[in-house]
Image (cartoon, rainbow, N blue to C red):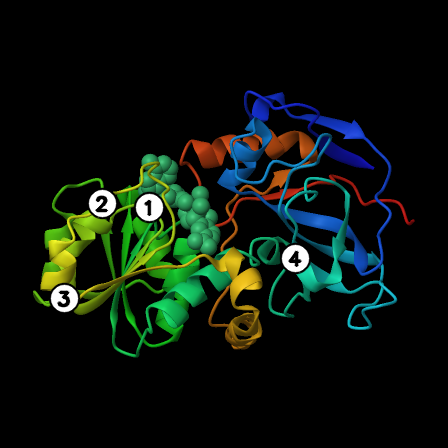
Amino acid sequence: MRAIVVKSWLKGPSDMEVKDIPIPTPKDGELLVRVDSAGANFFDILMVQGKYQIKPPFPFTPGAEFSGTVVKASPSDPRFATGDRVFGSNPTGAYAEYIAVPSIQCFHIPPTLSFEQAAGFYITYPTSYAGLVLRAGIKQGDWVLVHAAAGGVGIAAIQIAKALGAHVIAAVGSDSKFELCRQQGAEHCINYSESTWPAKALELTSGKGVDIVYDPVGLVEKSLKCVAWNGRIVVVGFAAGTIESVATNRILLKNVAVTGVHWGAYVRNEPERIPEVWDALFKLAEDGLIKPVVYEPVFSGLDRVKDALSAIAGRQTHGKVVVRPSELPLPKL
Ligand SMILES: NC(=O)c1ccc[n+]([C@@H]2O[C@H](COP(=O)([O-])OP(=O)(O)OC[C@H]3O[C@@H](n4cnc5c(N)ncnc54)[C@H](OP(=O)(O)O)[C@@H]3O)[C@@H](O)[C@H]2O)c1
């Protein structure tokens, strides 16, 4: 099969090479999946450079999210059969034509989602659901300010907040993303590259401020200027590249709760909450209330992974960036 193979730390994604390697043999408890689509993430860039927290042994194939068809089921997991449409995640291996992956890291694709939409469902949606519901205790009628609203977790947060009856203000880095955010359910859009954005958020909430700030960027300090009494600020990520130091007096003055969400760590720390989150998401997907937005164009062929990752690094994308590893139908195994 064809796969991206990394044999030493690279300068960047443009140094990635596509090689012919054997199809992986699934171990006990693993499914062999023919990859239809792979979700691209900024951390893929860091991983091939050796700058990410996970440093796989060489050689490895990057790519952490996928959707595809089961070609070899696992005798120890009767939930999956050959031919099933699945999506899932693994620290490595998705930028390939086939992936062997523990079945517990896979789900069936809801009938309402395509392979391309499902490829980016595994990380973004549960992160945003856990952030808004488990951490911020979102309620009907809350005002939610979503930063990086046109990105992967941002679009998921808009859709989930809207589905749960909240009002959404989408904050993005350019006005060209306003229309997309409105289509996802945002009532108002603001541009955080303009310094007046906290004042605008206050104005939109008649001076009261927003009840929840969902922050994948690193805008806690400024968001404290437009958060309401008893507001909740959810720290999701640091897309702007710096980790903030915050003047804690503002947290006290407005009775604010600043909380983090680290979805990937629920497996280790609170596994009992995971089915609750997925059950809720599958119900929302089946009701058509959430639907991943796939960035166009979808990148076709493993040679295009570098272009997909460059587009993410260049801040040119919205929604979820997806790569289809095979340009042609794969032969039957
Ligand atoms: N805590 C968790 O469990 C968890 C889970 C998933 C992701 N995350 C984190 O959440 C963040 C967003 O992830 P994502 O998947 O939504 O990423 P994404 O789709 O690549 O979106 C990131 C967005 O951040 C915005 N941004 C603001 N300042 C930026 C800067 N200086 N450079 C680049 N982008 C900037 C950009 O939108 P504008 O151009 O509109 O500003 C960009 O579209 C990442 O930091 C990621 O690590 C955390």
Residues at discs 1 and 2 in contact (Cβ within 8 Å)? yes
Q: Which of 251 and 192 is in front in this view?
A: 251
Residues at discs 3 and 4 in contact (Cβ within 8 Å)? no
Sequence-first tag of 3 and 1? 3
Q: How far apart are marks 3 and 2 (CA)?
A: 17 Å
Q: Distance between the residues labelled 1 and 2?
A: 11 Å
Is residue 79 toward the left or the right of residue 242 in the image?
right
Q: Which mark, residue 192? A: 2
Report the residue marked by disc 1. 217
Q: Residue at x 87, y 37 (%)?
A: 22
Sequence-first tag of 4 and 1? 4
Residues at discs 4 and 2 in contact (Cβ within 8 Å)? no
Q: Nearer the viewer, residue 182 or 261?
A: 261
Pointer 4 local density, CA inside 10 Å: few below 14, some 14–19, many at least 20 = many
Q: Which amino acid does label 2 sit on?
A: Tyr
Report the residue marked by disc 3. 205
Q: Which residue is drawn at 40% across and 36% down?
A: 315
**Secondary element at tag 2:** loop
Q: What residue type is labelled 4?
A: Gly
Of marks 3 and 1, the one in the foreground: 1
Pointer 3 local density, CA inside 10 Å: few below 14, some 14–19, many at least 20 = some
